[in-house]
Amino acid sequence: MTLGASPKLKAAGLTLFAALLWGCAPVGTRYLVGSTHAGLPPLPFIALRYLIASIFFVPVLWGELRRWPRSELVLGAFCGLVGVMGYNLPNVIGSRTVSAGMAGLLNGAEPLLIVLLLALQRRKLPSRWTMLAGAVGICGIGMLALSAGPAVGDARGIALLLLGALCWAAYCVIAAPLLQRRGVLAMTAITVIAGTLPLLAVGLPGMPEMMLHMSLRQWEVLAGLSVGTSVIAIVAWNAGSAGLGAEQSAWFLYLLPVVSAAGGTIVLGEPVTLTEFSGGGLIMLSVFLSQRK
């Protein structure tokens, strides 16, 4: 191994680690807010999850605020609104009625969305492969919508999860320059805290009552989501993305459907229907095609 390859290998390892952790997130979220599981109220849940996560970043943000120009602070805060609030708010509401496996399959569309947004940002028409990928992906999403039902997912939940996936793809594209200029920890701190504030605004009123009725097991899962997926994973992802770039990092999001579907089946006992499996397969094919040159 050459010295020049080492930083890229490290970035790939961090990105892979983040993707594996995020693949578990739909399972934990579904367990806590799913209508057939713990059934916690989604808005207080997501607000508490990110309140816990943001505590870890307050010292970092305190030391960075004076170093950032106002324009970059505004852009960093906007990234937080898009990537933290924009992704998590529709995601947690949709997870009440959408199985963890299907949530993972829908999140598998994020790499395709990243490629399309990058093409728009560069003002360059997508390649024929990308346009073909888009058509295949739309067919896959349609098949997932056809499989809508109480045990798998309803159309509203599917739409919300797709909206969350689009917001995360937008975050990956918009945040890339700031990650390069300002560093991983500083960028992560401002985005997590900026995204947490509006979540608290909508979730704080119901938080005390929810906390009083949570079991020890529910607190353990919440702690794992808060620290594992909202602190460790996002720092690892931002570090890996800074080294690889948004487009190369997107490849690792292919793992989300695999981990989520396996976890949903093993931990939550959720079946995978043939229509759901086929639609997810088309989405994964569209992601593969989108990366062809």
Image (cartoon, grey):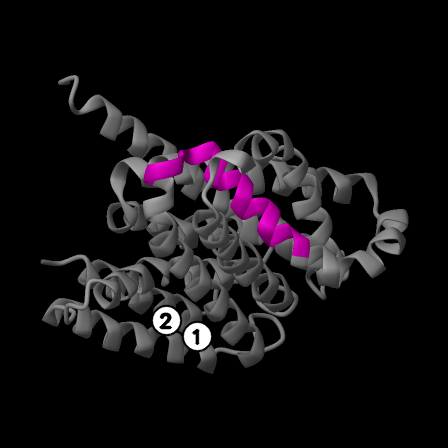
Magenta: predominant secondary structure element?
Answer: helix
Asked which secondary structure carries label 2, the reply is helix
In the picture, the disc for residue 279 is: 2
Choose between 79 and 26: the one closer to the eye: 79
Residue at x-position 25% and y-position 61%? 118
Q: Which mark is residue 86?
A: none
Residue nearer the viewer, 13 or 52: 52
Whichever of callouts 1 and 2 sits on the residue coming sooner in the sequence is: 1
Can residue 97 be spotted in the picture?
yes
Vertical position of residue 177 compared to residue 185: above or below: below
Task: Say which residue appears at 44% left-offset and 51% top-offset.
Answer: 71
User: How far is disc 1 from disc 2 in space, using C-alphas?
Assistant: 5 Å
Indicate the quadrant containing the N terminus: top left, top right, bottom left or bottom right: top left
Q: Which residue is mark 1?
A: 144
Q: Report the amino acid beneath label 1.
A: Leu
Q: Residue at x 9, y 58 (%)?
A: 293
Disc 1 vs disc 2: Cβ atoms closer than 8 Å?
yes
Q: Position of residue 41 (x, y in %)?
A: 76, 62
Q: Is residue 37 visible?
A: no
**Magenta part of the chain:** 180-197
